[in-house]
Image (spheres, grey):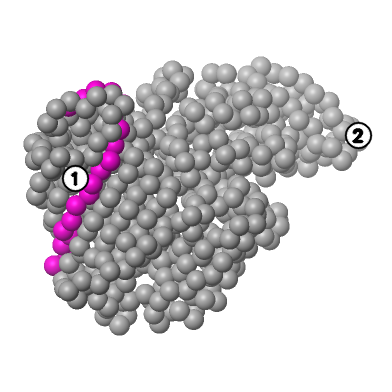
Amino acid sequence: MKKFFFSLFFLICFTPCFPQQKFTLQDTLRGTLTAERKCFDVQFYDLSLAVQLNQHLLNGSNRIYFKATETFSTLQLDLYENINIRKITDEKENLLSYKRNGNAVFIQLHEPLQKNSSSFLTVYYEGEPHKAINPPWDGGFVWALDSLDRPWVSVACEGVGASLWWPCKDHPSDEPDSMRMRFEVANPLFCASNGNLISTTPTNRNTTVYEWRVHYPINTYNITLNIGAYAHLHDLYTRTDGSALDLDYYVLSFNKEKASKHFEQVKPMLACYEKLFGPYPFQKDGYALIESPYWGMEHQSAIAYGNRFKNNMVNLDYIVVHESGHEWWGNHVSASDHADLWIHEAFTTYGETLLLECEQGKDIAEKYLTGQKRLIKNREPIIGPYGVNYHYWEDSDMYYKGAWMLHTLRGSLNNDSLWFALLRNIQRTFGGQAISSSQLITYINNFTGFDYTGFFAQYLLRTDLPLFEYEVLKQDKKSVKLKFRWISEVEGFSMPLVLQTSQAAPLKIYPNSTFQTVSFPCIDIKTCLDQLSRSFYIETRQIKSKK
């Protein structure tokens, strides 16, 4: 568990943003780091689960290894209240008492656990998990049949929470250092999950136990199981550091040939992403695409793929591109609160544009990004309310406005060497961690040498755009004299802008809330300001000069 401190500036700015948002006690228990959560740090989950396909039932246990960050007697875990807890035991097999408050489970230890001590407890449970209504947006368990009427089961639980199907500390700030999963399923079906397949063990019940192991920190919602009549394809990708990365594809048996051809795009995609963001983060666990009965989800090292082998993103498969980008943004660098999930989605969405730029050139990338601008709604702030189980599915600005915010930051820097170094160094610095907006913004300010606090407050906490107001004071055949300023309700807002000139070098200006003037080589003012609409998500307004 990491402790995060949000700047007073952000808290003050954030307060009035959601006057109509309503949350329940259950949202608070899920989204808040209560005292019963702060007191321990999860180190390892050991999940064992039997899946009964005909009854849609789960029956299993989860052993939770943890370290006390302070002395405590009671801790909070999470498990949906429709799932029955059979018993909870400690490391000495003592039965532990507990109380349930909806989906929150408060467990009383036999005796206080001292600070810095380690222990474990085991939760035994059974029940029918919540069914997904519209996965992945309205998630849960997906009990489906493939086109040959064979069982096809998966899960998507971002937002609704992993605790809908297994007991855990269901808060994004605390990721286990690693995890083991054992799933028992009926023969002849196969179960694919995260990380490495360690063993397959037949039982005398006409079932097989599939044991998987994850070697890295992982979000609880990223843990997955996929049951179906899968065929397995294996390949190798040579990473930028020369090491080999396992590529594994699990697809329905009749799609094996189609998948083999379609997934040829994975290697060049990974090469570009590694160039942009750094080495693929989960080498020991490998990279996998698993065919699923819903569109897709970024399950770490086990991406759910349901786009039916279609290229619907400028000759690329959108789900392959987007969900793979999450391996860096969301899985490797994670948000510590549901409110900050823009860290997952904005960087991943802009990563789509960067990938197109890498593979197909800037013109194609710019057209793609321009298309995304039309999807921005500007109805709600990108950052949500802190400390609750905030759902953002109804608004897409975390994706598209978030992408344009990052494109605007890149334009403001006007230094691609610095921009791409920033992306790679965010990965190096925060990889394997869950971080806050405040942490990330402070890092960006320090790395770039410019205070972008007001910039992020404008784009993350407000729905309006900064207004660049300008007046042409003088223009002749060689140059323009321009008067300009920013208009923004964010106190201290500033952002450098780049203007085209009639010469080779562009002009970088530093507007603020007071008028400034500048003269620069420019034959046509419209052409010289054209860079603004292509590189910045802002509003502009020309003041008509008095005659």
Mark 1, residue position:
122
Image coordinates of residue 528 in percent, x first then y, are 78, 39
Disc number for residue 478: 2
Disc number for residue 385: none
In this rendering, the answer to whether 6 lies above or below 164 is above
Q: Secondary structure at mark 2?
A: loop
In this rendering, the answer to whether 146 lies above or below 456 is below
Q: Taking 114 as reference, is 287 left or right?
A: right
Q: Is residue 69 magenta?
A: yes
Nearest the eye: 424 or 519: 424
Discs 1/2, front: 1
Image coordinates of residue 482 in percent, x first then y, are 78, 26
Question: Residue 27: which quarter of the image?
Answer: top left
Q: Which residues are magenta?
A: 55-73
Q: Main secondary structure of the magenta part?
A: strand
Sort mark 1 into few (<14), some (14-19) or many (20+) by Cα contacts within 10 Å: many
| Residue 445 in sight from this viewpoint | yes
